[in-house]
Amino acid sequence: MKLRFPMAAPQTATPPLSSASAPRAQLIHIEVDRRLGHEWDEWNGRPLPGGGDFSAAPGLFFRFAALTIATATGAVALLLYLIGPRLGTLSPLVPRSLWLALALFAALQWLYLGVLAASFYSGRNLLPERVLERGPYLQLMNYTSLVARGFGKRDWVEHAAIDIYNTLAERRGRRVGKGELLVLIPRCLSKQALDGVLEIAGRYEVPVFVATRGQLARRVIRERRPRAVVAVACERDMMTGLRDVAGKLPVLGLTMQLPNGPCRDAAIDLGQMEKWVQGLVAKS
């Protein structure tokens, strides 16, 4: 493993976001020998649907989340139905207690999903972040993604889930100092997107790290000890990153568009990135 600290990328013909003299952040690249795109092993090389833009309405996630809860509850209920008679030989109270526990747990899941939806659509977070976007929601996102895969809707459902997470997290109005924010990007950004990220980070004096996999991203976070992170990744990698990091540290996750397929020349919404960075960095 090597650590490489290159100078800022040279200017190109791509128009800057503000002016030609805008400061640019130093790009700190963490390099390892690794095959890119392990989340895309099944890609057949054909153009991705929608030009690699998996934008989806939030309601798609809520529908699949409801299906996930119903499926999980049904599976456990079937198991209890099959083994109930044997458990009853131990004591009649055993199957009854298990059925009661299942009913209670299912009720709590449906209640949580309802509060989550109410928080998102009402414009007001109804629970603390440790119980909402940085709590059980992270696990619900991942279980829902597993169900969505079976319907060929993984990327769209994940995009909707990430949008919901970002809305809830951004609503907290968190502020940090310039040295307390970290920007994490993948190495598959297009030149235009990379130049834009460096210019934004330079204006707000925040460091930009290129981490080639989640393990290294977590290492950067441990070493830099930021108070907030703005991360860029495709939906698949973002889901893993949020699951691993968001429970411990506030994160805003910017997904990418993949017009040339996964892992190369990815585009991002630079306006959204600047809005987040500007909103997070406290005025000095």
Image (tube, rainbow, N blue to C red):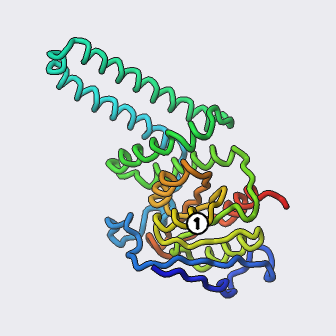
- The picture quadrant where one finds residue 129 is top right
Residue 79 in percent (x, y) is at 22, 29
Please state, as top left, top right, bottom left or bottom right, where the N terminus lies in the image. Answer: bottom left
From the viewer's side, name the closer residue of 239 and 92: 92
Residue 182 in percent (x, y) is at 65, 64
Residue 94 in percent (x, y) is at 25, 17
Residue 228 in percent (x, y) is at 65, 56
Q: Residue at the spot x=41%, y=73% of the render?
A: 36
* Outermost right residue: 284
Q: Residue at the spot x=69%, y=44% of the render?
A: 171
CA neighbours of label 1 inside 10 A, class few (<14), some (14 to 19), many (20+): few
Give the secondary structure at mark 1: helix
Name which residue type carries label 1. Glu
From the viewer's side, name the closer residue of 169 and 189: 169
Residue 209, placed above or below residue 82: below
Please state, as top left, top right, bottom left or bottom right, where the C terminus lies in the image. Answer: bottom right
Tell whether 222 sits left or right of 200.
Answer: left
Tell whether 281 sits left or right of 87.
Answer: right
* Outermost front residue: 223
Question: In this figure, which residue is indicated by the disc labeled 1?
Answer: 223
Q: Residue at the spot x=62%, y=61% of the render?
A: 225
Residue 284, placed above or below residue 247: below
